Image: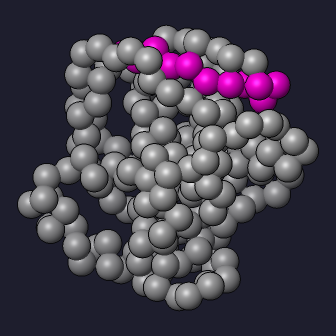
Amino acid sequence: MSTLPIYLYGNEVLKKKAKHVTEVTDREITLIRDMFETMAESSGIGLAANQVGELKQILVLDISDMEAGKGTKPLAMINPEIIDEEGEWEMEEGCLSIPDVREKVKRPERIQVRFNDVNMNEVEMEADGMLARVIQHEMDHLNGVLFLDHLSSTKRTLLRSRLKKIMKGDVETTYDVVVAAEPKSKPKKR
């Protein structure tokens, strides 16, 4: 396993819709393992393939270290889709691709999601609370949506200067990143 650089805000790959996965090969298995490693090394609780430069409908999450996630196992989801949702819950969110920015986002509190596991078996599960929030946040990534897109235009305007700094790589992280402002940028340790 190896860690992958995380693409920062401003990279086009974060605004593109990921492609449906039709089969899981060694390449996808390696990607999933590397995504788990990358997420753990960057102290994240969820990671979508877009965030590591892959336009594939794959996400990983692990909330087991959180109080709200006790007893939850790490999970890889391929081609996830929400088939039902209920309630509403507002909570502050952050993102590894948008370091040092946290804002309140409203999302459904409970969801039912259908996805393929790593063996391409179809799975349906219900999730609520933190697990539902992380799944929805990462699924947004797979659809080219950032948590910032859920904010009011006024809120986004207030964040503009911070977001420009992130685009230029003027941010401290403990993980390798790909900066948007540098064409064909190489991973940098921040």
Principal secondary structure, stretch drawn in magenta = strand
Q: Which residue is most to the right?
A: 26
Residue located 53% across and 88% down the image = 182
Q: How is the image coloured?
A: one colour
Q: Which residue is most to the left?
A: 154
Q: Position of residue 92 (x, y in %)?
A: 29, 41
Magenta-colored span: 110-120
Q: Residue 183 occupies which quadrant of the picture?
A: bottom right
Between 182 and 162, which is closer to the camera in this rendering? Answer: 182
Residue located 67% across and 83% down the image = 186
Q: Which residue is most to the bottom?
A: 182
Side of 133 relative to 159 (left or right): right
* In this view, 79 is above or below 154: above
* In this view, 156 is above or below 181: above
Q: Can residue 125 be seen in this view?
A: yes
* In this view, 183 is above or below 73: below
Identify the image quadrant of the C terminus.
bottom right
Between 129 and 56, which is closer to the camera in this rendering? Answer: 56
Report if residue 89 lies within the magenta region.
Answer: no
Side of 140 relative to 114 (left or right): left
Q: Residue 140 occupies which quadrant of the picture?
A: top left
Report if residue 117 lies within the magenta region.
Answer: yes
Q: Position of residue 19 (x, y in %)?
A: 61, 47
Q: Position of residue 114 (x, y in %)?
A: 56, 19
Q: Position of residue 38 (x, y in %)?
A: 69, 53
Residue located 9% across and 60% down the image = 154
Side of 37 relative to 112 (left or right): right
